Amino acid sequence: MTFEKTPRGSYGQNVPSFAKPLVKAMNPLMLWQARRGGKMMQMTMVVLTTTGAKSGQRRQVALAALPEGDGAWLLVASAAGSATNPGWYHNLAAHPDQAELQVGKQKYAMHATQLSGDEREAAWQKVVAAGPRYKGYATKTDRLIPIIRLTAPATSA
Protein backbone atom coordinates (compact mmCIF):
# COMPACT_ATOMS: atom_id res chain seq x y z
CA MET A 1 0.00 0.00 0.00
CA THR A 2 1.39 3.39 -0.94
CA PHE A 3 1.40 6.36 1.36
CA GLU A 4 -1.20 8.69 -0.15
CA LYS A 5 -1.00 12.03 1.61
CA THR A 6 -4.20 13.61 2.87
CA PRO A 7 -4.58 17.17 1.55
CA ARG A 8 -4.78 20.15 3.87
CA GLY A 9 -8.19 21.44 4.83
CA SER A 10 -9.75 24.80 4.07
CA TYR A 11 -10.28 25.62 7.75
CA GLY A 12 -9.21 24.38 11.14
CA GLN A 13 -7.99 25.17 14.64
CA ASN A 14 -5.72 28.21 14.59
CA VAL A 15 -2.57 27.96 16.64
CA PRO A 16 -1.74 31.35 18.21
CA SER A 17 1.58 32.78 17.01
CA PHE A 18 3.03 32.74 20.54
CA ALA A 19 2.40 29.00 20.84
CA LYS A 20 4.87 27.85 18.18
CA PRO A 21 8.02 28.95 20.07
CA LEU A 22 6.48 27.63 23.28
CA VAL A 23 5.87 24.21 21.71
CA LYS A 24 9.43 24.17 20.37
CA ALA A 25 10.79 25.01 23.81
CA MET A 26 8.61 22.32 25.43
CA ASN A 27 9.69 19.58 23.00
CA PRO A 28 12.73 18.43 25.06
CA LEU A 29 10.52 18.14 28.15
CA MET A 30 7.89 16.17 26.22
CA LEU A 31 10.57 13.86 24.80
CA TRP A 32 11.94 13.30 28.32
CA GLN A 33 8.44 12.51 29.62
CA ALA A 34 7.76 10.09 26.75
CA ARG A 35 11.04 8.24 27.39
CA ARG A 36 10.00 7.82 31.02
CA GLY A 37 6.78 6.11 29.93
CA GLY A 38 4.24 8.91 30.33
CA LYS A 39 0.66 9.17 29.14
CA MET A 40 -0.88 11.70 26.76
CA MET A 41 -4.59 11.87 25.89
CA GLN A 42 -5.11 8.63 27.85
CA MET A 43 -2.70 6.86 25.49
CA THR A 44 0.95 5.81 25.64
CA MET A 45 3.48 8.57 25.04
CA VAL A 46 6.09 7.57 22.48
CA VAL A 47 8.99 9.23 20.71
CA LEU A 48 8.71 9.14 16.93
CA THR A 49 11.91 9.69 14.99
CA THR A 50 11.51 10.55 11.31
CA THR A 51 13.71 11.75 8.48
CA GLY A 52 12.90 15.28 7.34
CA ALA A 53 11.01 15.36 4.05
CA LYS A 54 13.03 18.37 2.82
CA SER A 55 16.07 18.56 5.10
CA GLY A 56 16.90 14.87 5.38
CA GLN A 57 17.73 15.50 9.06
CA ARG A 58 16.48 13.19 11.79
CA ARG A 59 13.58 14.73 13.75
CA GLN A 60 12.00 13.62 17.02
CA VAL A 61 8.56 14.36 18.40
CA ALA A 62 6.63 13.08 21.40
CA LEU A 63 3.19 11.75 20.45
CA ALA A 64 0.29 9.80 21.86
CA ALA A 65 0.09 6.34 20.32
CA LEU A 66 -2.30 3.44 20.60
CA PRO A 67 -0.87 -0.10 20.64
CA GLU A 68 -2.66 -2.55 18.35
CA GLY A 69 -0.90 -5.76 19.30
CA ASP A 70 1.78 -7.70 17.40
CA GLY A 71 4.06 -4.66 17.78
CA ALA A 72 1.83 -2.38 15.66
CA TRP A 73 0.93 1.15 16.77
CA LEU A 74 -1.59 3.76 15.61
CA LEU A 75 -0.67 7.43 15.31
CA VAL A 76 -3.16 10.24 14.67
CA ALA A 77 -2.01 13.21 12.57
CA SER A 78 -4.58 15.52 14.16
CA ALA A 79 -2.52 18.66 14.80
CA ALA A 80 -5.30 19.48 17.30
CA GLY A 81 -7.76 19.99 14.44
CA SER A 82 -5.58 22.33 12.40
CA ALA A 83 -6.22 22.77 8.67
CA THR A 84 -2.70 21.46 8.01
CA ASN A 85 -1.10 18.11 8.69
CA PRO A 86 1.72 18.04 11.26
CA GLY A 87 5.36 18.10 10.11
CA TRP A 88 6.04 14.55 11.29
CA TYR A 89 3.26 13.35 8.97
CA HIS A 90 4.99 14.87 5.92
CA ASN A 91 8.26 13.27 7.03
CA LEU A 92 6.64 9.82 7.30
CA ALA A 93 4.97 10.24 3.91
CA ALA A 94 8.34 11.05 2.33
CA HIS A 95 10.25 8.29 4.16
CA PRO A 96 7.81 5.63 5.44
CA ASP A 97 10.60 3.06 5.90
CA GLN A 98 12.84 5.32 8.00
CA ALA A 99 10.68 5.63 11.11
CA GLU A 100 11.79 4.71 14.60
CA LEU A 101 9.47 4.39 17.56
CA GLN A 102 10.70 4.61 21.12
CA VAL A 103 8.38 3.24 23.80
CA GLY A 104 9.95 3.88 27.18
CA LYS A 105 13.56 2.79 26.77
CA GLN A 106 12.91 0.39 23.87
CA LYS A 107 13.49 1.51 20.27
CA TYR A 108 11.97 -0.15 17.22
CA ALA A 109 12.53 0.32 13.49
CA MET A 110 9.09 0.81 11.94
CA HIS A 111 7.31 1.08 8.60
CA ALA A 112 4.51 3.66 8.27
CA THR A 113 1.29 3.02 6.35
CA GLN A 114 -1.58 5.47 6.04
CA LEU A 115 -4.93 3.80 6.62
CA SER A 116 -7.91 4.45 4.38
CA GLY A 117 -11.52 3.37 3.92
CA ASP A 118 -12.99 0.84 6.34
CA GLU A 119 -9.59 0.12 7.84
CA ARG A 120 -9.15 3.79 8.75
CA GLU A 121 -12.68 4.01 10.13
CA ALA A 122 -12.16 0.96 12.38
CA ALA A 123 -8.87 2.42 13.64
CA TRP A 124 -10.52 5.84 14.18
CA GLN A 125 -13.16 4.21 16.39
CA LYS A 126 -10.41 2.58 18.49
CA VAL A 127 -8.57 5.89 18.78
CA VAL A 128 -11.68 7.87 19.80
CA ALA A 129 -12.58 5.22 22.39
CA ALA A 130 -9.08 5.48 23.91
CA GLY A 131 -8.72 9.27 23.55
CA PRO A 132 -12.12 11.00 23.23
CA ARG A 133 -10.51 14.41 22.61
CA TYR A 134 -9.66 13.31 19.06
CA LYS A 135 -13.36 13.32 18.17
CA GLY A 136 -13.46 17.06 18.92
CA TYR A 137 -10.42 17.70 16.75
CA ALA A 138 -12.26 16.19 13.77
CA THR A 139 -15.05 18.77 14.19
CA LYS A 140 -12.62 21.71 14.05
CA THR A 141 -11.43 21.01 10.50
CA ASP A 142 -12.71 19.75 7.18
CA ARG A 143 -9.45 17.84 6.71
CA LEU A 144 -9.73 14.07 7.00
CA ILE A 145 -7.42 13.39 9.93
CA PRO A 146 -4.88 10.77 8.87
CA ILE A 147 -4.41 7.58 10.87
CA ILE A 148 -0.98 5.99 10.51
CA ARG A 149 -0.16 2.40 11.39
CA LEU A 150 3.44 1.66 12.34
CA THR A 151 4.57 -1.92 11.94
CA ALA A 152 7.88 -3.72 12.02
CA PRO A 153 9.51 -3.59 8.57
CA ALA A 154 9.14 -6.69 6.43
CA THR A 155 12.28 -8.79 6.43
CA SER A 156 13.55 -10.29 3.22
CA ALA A 157 13.88 -14.04 3.23
Image (cartoon, rainbow, N blue to C red):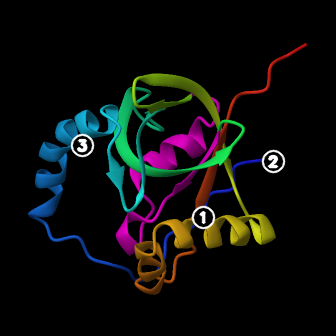
Q: Estimate the x, y position of residue 147 in percent, counting from the top left.
A: 60, 60
Q: Which residues are magenta?
A: 72-98
Which quarter of the figure has residue 83?
bottom left
Q: Earlier in the sequence, mark 3 or mark 2?
A: 2
Measure the alpha-carbon separation of dots 1 and 3.
26 Å
Q: Secondary structure at mark 3?
A: helix
- Mark 1: few/some/many CA within 10 Å (<14, 14-19, 20+): some
Q: Earlier in the sequence, mark 2 or mark 1?
A: 2
Which label number is shown at residue 6? 1
Mark 1 vs mark 3: give the one in front: 3
Q: Amino acid at mark 2?
A: Met
Task: Please determine whether, in this image, residue 91 is positioned above or below residue 118.
Answer: above
Q: Is residue 83 magenta?
A: yes
Q: Amino acid at mark 1?
A: Thr
Q: Along the line of sight, which residue is nearer the eye, 128 or 95? A: 128
Mark 3 vs mark 2: give the one in front: 3
Q: Estimate the x, y position of residue 154 in percent, counting from the top left.
A: 79, 26
Q: Earlier in the sequence, mark 1 or mark 3?
A: 1
Q: Amino acid at mark 3?
A: Met
| Residue for badge 2 | 1
The quarter in which the C terminus is drawn is top right
- Which residue sits at x=18%, y=52%? 23
| Residue for badge 3 | 30
Q: Is residue 82 visible?
A: no
- Mark 2: few/some/many CA within 10 Å (<14, 14-19, 20+): few
Q: Estimate the x, y position of residue 141 in percent, counting from the top left.
A: 44, 82
Q: What is the residue that sits farthest to the right in this orientation?
A: 157
Q: Is residue 124 visible?
A: yes
Q: Along the line of sight, which residue is nearer the eye, 66 or 87? A: 66
Q: Secondary structure at mark 2?
A: loop
Q: Secondary structure at mark 1?
A: loop
Measure the alpha-carbon separation of dots 2 and 1.
15 Å
